[in-house]
Amino acid sequence: MAARILSGRPVVESLHARIQQVLARRAPHQGPPTLTVLLPNDPSAQAYARAIRKQFTTLRLDYCTVDIDDTLDESRFAILLKRLAEDESVTGILALQPLPKGVSRRSLARLMPPTKDVDGVSFEQQGRLAIGSPWIAPSTPLGGLILLQHYGIEVAGRHAVVIGRSPVVGRPLALLLLARDATVTICHRRTPDLAKLTRQADLLFVAAGQPHLVKPDMVAPGAVVIDFGVSVRDGRLIGDVDPAVAEVASALAPVPGGTGPVTTAVLALNLLRLAGLLEENDLFPGAP
Ligand code: ADP
């Protein structure tokens, strides 16, 4: 069996069409929503920032960057976020990884103003997601679910296995799946027999950051596999799922080309939500 390849491209196109519709509806005096990206001196962050700029330019959304150097300590980081929180021209803020050494993920969660938190990293947005009442969800996992929805793949009532529990991908993904009525198993570095669990998955989500961790013998025939892994090897993007998995799975969202491009479009969608242009029940666009 050759898996159906779940490409991100048509999903991006339909999200862009929707974003453009929403932007066209806004009042004439309202300027475009603006995203401020806190940009570390790191090649993968800079590549992601370029991808954001490209999509935002296409969508005519405003975008600017603030360079973050690794010596920035927590008190200067707090001052920066306070200034951005008070700046009315800033709609959303995205802090790209890696954070400066002196700023922990926990400090970011505390300092990020929830009403400008475009990627759902603040305690408030994470807490809302944890109690099943999400408003903003991190764009990578939300993009994964929007991709499944685009291809008509049902989540409710199915067994979803998530590899990875980071606060930006695995953990919020598991919570989003739970909110969509999946039965969820979360695996991580200390899970003893990974393959035993992954073989039980109807839907397998992989966000471990380990190139080609998932091999064909770890996947049940007919399962749906979604790869979120982003590693760089010899200048090429490489996912967490061995491409040979396509011979076993019924559908595969590969790296590159699957969830990656959707992430950036969801970031734009989240920005519209922060700008008050989308309703709460629009978290899953197109959902009945
Ligand atoms: P990301 O930001 O992409 O989610 P992180 O490095 O923050 O990446 O998190 C990686 C996650 O993947 C962690 O939760 C870790 O426990 C999990 N993980 C890494 N390697 C393995 C592995 N070999 N088996 C199972 N889980 C793994």
Image (spheres, helix red, strand yellow):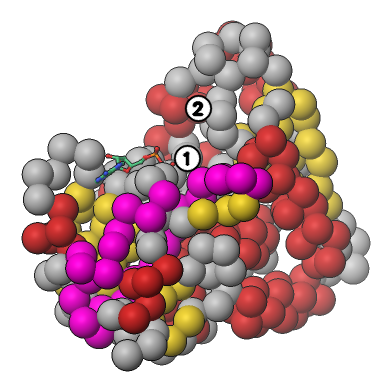
Query: Which residue does the image show at 16% across and 38% down from the upper left?
Result: 190
Question: Where is mark 1, residue-wise?
Answer: 121
Image location of residue 170, percent across then percent down: 34, 50
**Which sits earlier in the primary sequence, circle 2 or circle 1?**
2
Few, some or many C-alpha atoms within 10 Å of disc 2 (few <14, some 14-19, many ≥20)? some
State the image quarter where residue 23 is shown.
Answer: bottom right
Query: Which residue does the image show at 71% across and 45% down from the upper left?
Result: 47
What residue type is disc 1 on? Val
User: Which is more toward the observer, 246 or 6?
Assistant: 246
Secondary structure predominantly adopted by residues drawn in magenta: loop
Does residue 115 appear in the picture of this structure? no
* Spatial separation of the CA atoms under disc 2 and disc 1: 7 Å
Number of numbered markers: 2
> In the image, which disc is placed on residue 179?
none
What residue type is disc 2 on? Leu
Query: Which residue does the image show at 34% across and 81% down from the upper left?
Result: 247
User: Which is more toward the observer, 32 or 62?
Assistant: 62
Where does ligand 1 appear, by image quarter? top left
Q: Are marks 2 and 1 in contact (CB under 8 Å)?
A: yes
Does residue 111 appear in the picture of this structure? yes
Relative to residue 172, is residue 150 depicted above or below? Answer: below
Q: Quadrant of the C terminus?
A: bottom left
Few, some or many C-alpha atoms within 10 Å of disc 1 (few <14, some 14-19, many ≥20)? many
The part of the chain drawn in magenta is: 211-235
Image location of residue 244, percent across then percent down: 37, 71
Question: Where is mark 2, residue-wise?
Answer: 108
Image location of residue 150, percent across then percent down: 49, 83
The question of residue 218 being in magenta is answered with: yes
Q: Element under label 2?
A: helix
Q: Is residue 225 left or right of residue 140?
A: left
